[in-house]
């Protein structure tokens, strides 16, 4: 019979479509380096337990390093019998080092092996995504530093609300991404628990030291305390998929703002040609496809999370083959986010803000809150101040004039002691510079936040 890890009790070969359905090598090949690192550690543990000689250990390790190089150089030749990455590595190891390869799997199951591989892979993936997230933070920070005092309309309900600074807008996303990074780090901490040595489900009876394995594999800091749980715990995959999905949602919101802001109606930013595309029919079009895809791909990230949660729900205790379904969604989310973050950082880095268009979109009504604040300073209770300012806004609409063009007599009808000084509020820069509460949009505050982030992101 062909090379299989489990052929002994079978008398008939696997059906062709069953192999197609069952085999995972075409995607779990991505675990090759992790699988080999896990096996090298396992070989050491076997030697330390006296289950193989140090000479055999040496042969195994050298052989595994050769296989690792074949994968790294793209020279690995897969065989149709390579059911999954574990089978493939062991098969090739046997071809390279002979008989001794038959000892590598002593006391181990693919169940604890694949759980270990996935954790190693996930830890590496989290590191990569963290770097990408930081790249986007830096791009946003670069823009924020350029625009600490660039005034633009801030919106709630997508209606003009109050003036803000563009730098403040940029830093809002730096904050969101920081939480994404923390969430990923937190999920990764729980991925650092080692399942290896749990065997198929019950533990191993050959005296392999599991604690020792955590010293051999730097990524791990503890051993899983229950072998039944160890082989089937995919919480770390679900947690990372959730963190990736929420990151995707933040990116989608960034993208949505930039789609709007780059439209002719807003014109607040212009995206670089390199990250826009044209229309096959309308020669004038320049479309923000990069940002639309960033927005759209959040759907895949959410879908991959929901798919895995659905797979996990209702599984009986310990390993079940359903768990093989953890890989494709994880790889897909990783690749989707990796590229998405690279594109997002480049788009932000290369976009041009247009402070004139931002300023042109401001209108006096956005200072109605400042007007109410002015009344508060004159001793009017806020509820009343709100109503009085509202009446002035209504007057400005009725008269078809901006607030600053209403005569003082109009102001005095709502508040008798208003004098000329009220007109000082009609200055958008003054308005933002007064929002100097911590975390507010005042240029001074934004500059301080920029300095804080620069320090955090460059140290
Ligand atoms: N390819 C399998 C997976 O990804 C490896 C573990 C197989 N274990 C087993 N008992 N068949 O989950």
Image (spheres, helix red, strand yellow):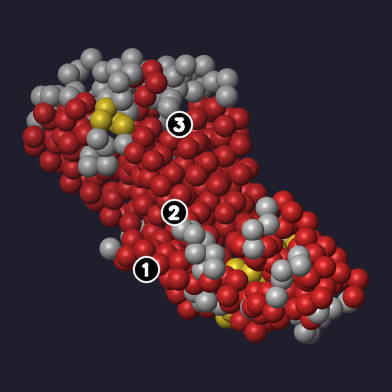
Quarter assignment of residue 351: bottom right
Q: Is residue 268 visible?
A: no
Q: Which residue is the extreme one toward the left? A: 54
> Is 298 placed left or right of 159 in the picture?
left
Residue 16 falls left or right of residue 278: left
Foreground: disc 1 or disc 3: 1
Mark 2–mark 1 distance (CA, rounded to whole Å):
15 Å
Using residue 316 as the reference point, say whether residue 362 is left or right of it.
Answer: right
Task: Return the residue at label 2.
Answer: 178
Q: Is residue 71 above or below residue 443?
A: above
Residue wearing tag 1: 451
Considering only order in the chain, which callout, 3 or 1, is on the residue closer to the N terminus?
Answer: 3
When the figure is inspected, residue 328 is found, relative to residue 449, above or below; the finding is above
Q: Residue at x 90, y 75 (%)?
A: 399
Of residues 456 and 272, the one drawn nearer to the viewer in this rendering = 456
Quadrant where the C terminus is found in the figure: bottom left
Give the distance between the C-alpha atoms of the residues marked 1 and 3, in whole angstroms. Answer: 40 Å
- Quarter holding residue 386: bottom right
**Element carrying mark 1:** helix
Q: Residue furthest right?
A: 398
Image location (x, y in percent) of residue 108: 29, 25
Mark 3 — residue?
Answer: 234
Residue 394: x, y in percent? 85, 65
């Amino acid at each position: 019979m062909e090379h299989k890890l489990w052929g002994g009790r079978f008398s008939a070969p696997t059906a062709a479509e069953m192999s197609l359905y069952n085999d995972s090598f075409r995607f779990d090949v991505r675990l090759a380096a992790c699988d080999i690192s896990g096996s090298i550690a396992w070989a050491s543990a076997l030697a330390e337990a006296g289950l193989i000689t140090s000479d055999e250990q040496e042969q195994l390790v050298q052989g595994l390093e050769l296989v690792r190089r074949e994968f790294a150089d793209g020279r690995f030749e897969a065989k149709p019998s390579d059911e999954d990455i574990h089978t493939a590595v062991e098969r090739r190891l046997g071809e390279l080092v002979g008989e001794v390869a038959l000892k590598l799997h002593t006391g181990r199951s693919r169940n604890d092996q694949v759980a270990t591989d996935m954790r190693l892979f996930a830890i590496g993936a989290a590191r990569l995504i963290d770097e990408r997230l930081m790249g986007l933070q830096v791009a946003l920070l670069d823009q924020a530093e350029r625009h600490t005092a660039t005034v633009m309309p801030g919106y709630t309900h997508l209606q003009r609300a109050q003036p803000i600074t563009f730098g403040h807008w940029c830093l809002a996303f730096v904050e969101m991404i920081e939480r994404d990074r923390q969430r990923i780090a937190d999920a990764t901490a729980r991925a650092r628990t080692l399942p290896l040595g749990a065997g198929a489900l019950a533990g191993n009876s050959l005296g392999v030291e599991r604690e020792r394995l955590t010293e051999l594999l730097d990524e791990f800091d503890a051993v899983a305390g229950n072998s039944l749980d160890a082989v089937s715990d995919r919480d770390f995959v679900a947690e990372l998929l959730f963190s990736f999905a929420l990151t995707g949602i933040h990116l989608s919101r960034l993208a949505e703002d930039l789609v709007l802001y780059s439209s002719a109606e807003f014109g607040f930013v212009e995206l670089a040609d390199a990250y826009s595309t044209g229309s096959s029919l309308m020669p004038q079009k320049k479309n923000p496809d990069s940002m639309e895809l960033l927005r759209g791909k959040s759907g895949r990230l959410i879908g991959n999370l929901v798919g895995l949660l659905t797979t996990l729900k209702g599984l009986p205790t310990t390993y079940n083959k359903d768990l093989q379904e953890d890989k494709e969604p994880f790889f897909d989310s990783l690749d989707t986010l990796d590229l998405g973050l690279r594109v997002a950082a480049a788009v932000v880095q290369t976009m041009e803000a247009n402070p004139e268009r931002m300023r042109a979109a401001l209108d006096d009504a956005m200072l109605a809150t400042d007007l109410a604040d002015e009344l508060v300073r004159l001793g009017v209770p806020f509820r009343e101040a709100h109503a009085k300012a509202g009446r002035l806004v209504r007057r400005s609409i009725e008269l078809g004039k901006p607030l600053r063009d209403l005569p003082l007599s109009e102001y005095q009808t709502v508040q008798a002691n208003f004098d000329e000084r009220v007109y000082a509020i009609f200055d958008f820069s003054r308005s933002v510079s007064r929002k100097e509460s911590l975390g507010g949009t005042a240029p001074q505050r934004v500059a301080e936040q920029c300095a804080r982030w620069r320090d955090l992101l460059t140290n």
